Amino acid sequence: MVNRRNFLKLGALFGSQVFLGCSTTSDLNALTDGRGMPLHHTKNGFQNYPTVPEPASLGVEFWYNRMKASFKSYPIPEGYYLPEKKAIQHYENLKGQNTITWIGQATFVLKIQNKVILTDPFFDNSVDPFGTVERFVPPGITLENLPSIDMIVISHNHRDHLSENVIDALPNKNRIQVFVPLGMKPFFAEKGYSKIHELDWFESATVGSIRMTSLPAVHYSGRGIWDKNETLWCSWAIESNTGSYFFSGDTAYSPTIFKRIGSEFGPFNLSMMTIGTYGNRKYGINNHANPEEAITMGLEIKTDISVGMHWGTLDLSEEPPWEPPERFRVSAAKAGIQHEKTWIMKIGETRLLPMQK
């Protein structure tokens, strides 16, 4: 019988040949309207499905508080990040093994079966063109010191998940495999990338022994005020014959989506979960899971280890910047999850990826 794991092993025999198609276990009819149009597609772009209420406008209070936040400075907690020289040494010490390195925000360097995968690359000093919201500390490993990248995985096009200068600057564009949600292929093609896999929810692409599947998320997209939701957003399943991993991107909690992911794609050896930027719910904005919801998501997708991300890099929300990891740990303990199964990594830290048992 050829199951998902055996399929990946067969894929390895074909080297870099790519297979495209829908997930074999998904009932896509459940996500389409009567005309066969996926329910997360709209006439002019995309929407969350199930739909999520959004505020009509953010109002003066939101923008006033965000402006005040741009003038704040926060003391950096001890042990929160590794100086770059130490971070590079950390990475080199585990060279040749399957590893995960947190660069900051939702940016990780994953090494899986000698392939280096870069997720949601954000390396800019500021998230906005005017420099009003700056990083607390530099990236764990700067752009010029990154290892050679084999694959790029993008969850959506927000500026804190996609640095245009990084996409411009990376060498060997003709050999890097790029995995993006619908609508984002032109962004990379215009910059010289040719191996671009643009996927809808529940579509997959396999390169060698690594299979990437675009999965639903509860969020939105846009790099400016005129392009909201013109491109899709997603989470990702990253599967190989040595392990299975989940990358949430930015997402709010859904009582249906993550149970479905767990049923069809779980269990996962490790999941990278958004745990910050939930403080703006006071304004009616709900597009990031809070730490408690991230723990619930981890249970529903059947992950062994959860890594907290999207915290402690930028001040984008009303919660204190160092609050998310503490709430993450407390919630995990209340759920009966062992301490060593809930990872709070230092920026720049490298750890061994858990493997398929």
Image (cartoon, helix red, strand yellow):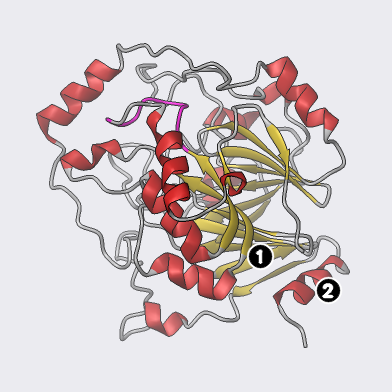
Answer with left or right where residue 326 lies relative to residue 268.
left
The 10 Å Cα crowd at callout 1, few under 14, some 14 to 19, many 20 or more, is many
Residue 147 drawn at (x, y percent):
77, 32
Which labelled disc corresponds to residue 10? Answer: 2
149 is higher (above) or lower (below) than 128: below
Please state which of residues 259 and 60 is positioned toward the viewer in this rendering. 259
Answer with left or right where residue 239 lies relative to residue 29.
right
Callout 1 secondary element: strand
Residue 165 drawn at (x, y percent):
57, 28
351 is higher (above) or lower (below) than 286: above
* Residue type marked 1: Ala
Q: Quadrant of the N terminus?
A: bottom right
Task: Give the CA distance from mark 2 to mark 1.
Answer: 14 Å
Residue 49 drawn at (x, y percent):
32, 66
Q: Is residue 112 magenta?
A: no
Q: Quadrant of the C terminus?
A: bottom right
Callout 2 secondary element: helix
User: What residue do we see at 30% from left, 11% from top?
Assistant: 71
Specify start and end residues of the magenta stretch as a single range: 310-318
Query: How many labels sit on residues?
Result: 2
User: What residue do we see at 54% from left, 62% from top?
Assistant: 214
* Residue type marked 2: Leu
Report which quarter residue 265 is drawn in.
Answer: bottom right
Which labelled disc corresponds to residue 205? Answer: 1
Residue 182 visible in the picture = no
24 is higher (above) or lower (below) than 105: below
